[in-house]
Amino acid sequence: RTIRRDDYTPPPFLIDTVDLVVELFADSAKVVSRMAVRRNPAAVAKPADLVLDGKKMDLLSVSLDGRAAAHEATPETLAIRAVPDRFTLEIATRLRPQDNAELTGLYKSRDIFCTQCEAEGFRRITYFLDRPDVMARYTTRITAEKSLAPVLLSNGNLVERGELDGGRHFAVWEDPFPKPSYLFALVAGPLDCLEDRFTTRSGREVTLRIYVRPGDVPRCDHAMESLKKSMKWDEDVYGLEYDLDTFMIVAIDDFNMGAMENKGLNVFNSKLVLANPETATDLDYHSIEAVIAHEYFHNWTGNRVTCRDWFQLSLKEGLTVLRDQQFSADMGSAADARIDDVRRLRAAQFPEDAGPMAHPVRPDSYIEINNFYTATVYQKGAEVVRMMHTLLGPERFRKGMDLYFQRHDGQAVTCDDFANAMEDASGVDLAQFRLWYAQAGTPDLKVEGRYDAAARRYTMTVDQSLRRTPGQPDKKPMHIPLSVGLLDGAGRDLPLKLAGEAAAGGTTRVLDVRNPRDVFVFEDVPEKPVASLLRGFSAPVKLQAPRSEEELTFLMAHDSDPFARWEAGQQLGARLILDMVAARKAGKPMVVPDLFVDAIRRTLDDQRLDRSFIADAVTLPGLAFLGELMPEIDIEGMWAAQQRVRGVLSQQLADRWSSVYDANHGSGPYRFSPEEVGRRRLRSTALSYLSTDKGEAARRRAVEYFENAKNMTEQVAGLGVLAELGGAEGDAALGAFHERWKGEPLVLDKWFGIQARTPTGDTLQRVKQLVDHPSYDRKNPNRVYSLIGAFASGNPVQFHAGGGAGYRFLADQVLATDRFNPQVAARLLAPLGSWRRYDAGRQTLMKRELARIVAEKGLSRDVFEIASKSLD
Ligand code: ARG
Ligand code: ZN
């Protein structure tokens, strides 16, 4: 059944308060929910019955105002017959958390009871109006045997706790803020915690607690520091303060996604909490900081102001991702952070926008909402809010945020409400801009420049187009902020004066592109400039500009905008790799031009650049990004060309890689600082270039690097290189790593992931063996993503090799997983959806697997939606 955005109607009833009593036992849980219900004065219809959502529970009893109530249950609803205008409803249900492998609703992760209610998990705990525009105040009483669950947590403030007969105890939590059911949380089990404090700007003393399994407390320091930085940052930048006396985070090993912003009680995948230098990489440290911030920021953008319905998901997710991106930019290097955002967008979102699941940032319909927690809703949604920030400027954007909270605090609202607040606070017309919420697909932007020396005029012609996407055959032109600069022959920014302006103003200007073709004229341009386009990646578009290789290398060396400077190198790299792919196809030799090698050499030699920027700049464009630039994805061609470029850079710059490798050895204890992270990244990048020839010296160096690794960042970098080198060294390193880390699940995930991502050797065979490895656990999402997900989504070379064996393997895994965890199964499936992008042979093989999946009996809605839409 398809749910449509246009069908939205306000809820016929409202629920003002919910009193929950949850009794936890070893093999079941009993839930009694007492609700104050009344008719919604704003409802359009006045139905006689109250129809609640509910799923996979045993209904024990229903009473209305203390008397038995006429009711009827179906597998997914409970109808209470002929209800009055205002009443108290009490419903008792029984659940089996220990058998809940879907990890949604109330479930058990090892010996910890926990919940995941977004999007529609609360209906697996009790019957309810499980939709975000029904906001209630919750009181939660939890009881459990003390020895099984010494810690009992829920949202809000602890108001009472005590002992009960039979070794049991109880705790009562009260959340003063009305909230939608998806923000409800309950956690119970044997947990230790790290405690700290934070004083808000206006003097509220907040107790901060991070709960983890006993023994893991020493690995919580980085998460706690990240939390305090987030709280401070949100006060400084947005004036937003925390609003309860405690803020709690719980780390859970079995979790479908990253983390969840439940009011006052965030639940996290343990990989996004636990860190020390021995077990976590720089990337893990970075992700922890970003996700702790993300979930904390949701307290205002998501919780205080929430979504009216799930089509508005990007209202909270796009905005909160933008806020966590701004936070990350402020914590480290802003240039790096932006490059990271764009890499991620291009690797995950651009392919989505070009595939069968392409959907607008605010989707129009869905079968299963869990399938719409996508790169489009999150990452592209963040780009949309960022473009508003660009169009309004920081001050007016902040005014818009203030107005948004002033108007909507405590409400469930829409993306339009957000755009209205921005528009009203700033006076900037966003009417056309709103198409970014409605139209799917990545716009193509063609920019051409012409210099008229006599008139000292530079004319920029911008053409936009947007290809059709499923369900959207005709597109309208978008409002695109295009940030540009002009460089003179010495690489300096020229002051910019647009035709009609009295004087030049600034060296970076944001052009308002609004039509299929727009023409911008710059005046008083003293010489033929080189244009710097899409500075800061000012819009999520694919840019085409006929720039010569010389112009691109010039920008690589001089552009004052660090993103554009990096991007020039990526464009140049992509262009030459694609030329090589074409040459290879025509049976011609693949040639790497000296100009590119020289540009990389100059980057390595540039003393003014920081190390992480250099590492970014000498890293070749990834296969996902390159594939998007090809009419038909030629995996072998891209891989061969990319390897050739790597080989040439490795050989011709061997002395540079060696000196970079030696110079960045580092000493002293591990520190997670931008400088140290940059140093480690640059050194491992050099190591990987030094290893491309697979010779004896390379093997010795990689073994030495791996064996002398002083932290997990270096261990993982070394192991990746050795796994790719293969042979005895590769096997030995993998064996040693497993032996050392077999007791650490999060580290073991890395071991599985590295093997699944190895582009060389018989990876599929290895992955199949690993499925049967005693350490493999098909019920644990982290493990499944680190093996099956990494192979199918992170290793295109191997996934698409072998005449369809990889596709068959993935389909088998999807079907097996779907029997107990549809959300994870649906996520694994995505790579098969891109079949149209490949050659006819692969198309047939990929479609065959999709058809086999669709034909399966008892398929979940999750997998059915992705598989069937992929075939359409
Ligand atoms: N709201 C969470 C976040 O911070 C994501 C939870 C999604 N969970 C799900 N089952 N769809 O982004
Ligand atoms: Zn979020």
Image: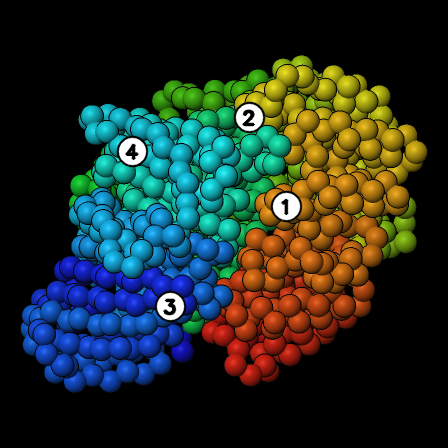
Q: Earlier in the sequence, mark 2 or mark 3?
A: 3
- Circles 4 and 2 in contact, beta carbons < 8 Å: no
Q: Identify residue for label 1.
A: 743
**Alpha-carbon span between mark 2 and mark 3:** 44 Å
Residue bearing the label numbered 4 = 207
Which residue lies most toward the front here?
Answer: 166
Q: Secondary structure at mark 1?
A: loop
Could you tell me residue 172's position as x and y percent? 22, 51
Q: Label 4 vs label 2: CA separation?
A: 25 Å
- Please state which amino acid type lies under the numbered disc 2: Phe
- What residue is disc 2 on? 672
Q: Quadrant of the C terminus?
A: bottom right
Image mark for residue 28: 3
Residue drawn at (21%, 29%) of the image: 204
Q: Quadrant of residue 245?
A: top left
Q: Nearer the viewer, mark 1 or mark 4?
A: 1
Q: Quadrant of the N terminus?
A: bottom left
Q: Is residue 44 above or below residue 319?
A: below
Q: Are marks 1 and 4 in contact (CB under 8 Å)?
A: no
Image disc number at residue 504: none
Q: Is residue 579 left or right of residue 254?
A: right
Disc with the residue nearer the chain's start (1 vs 4)? 4
Q: How is the image coloured?
A: rainbow
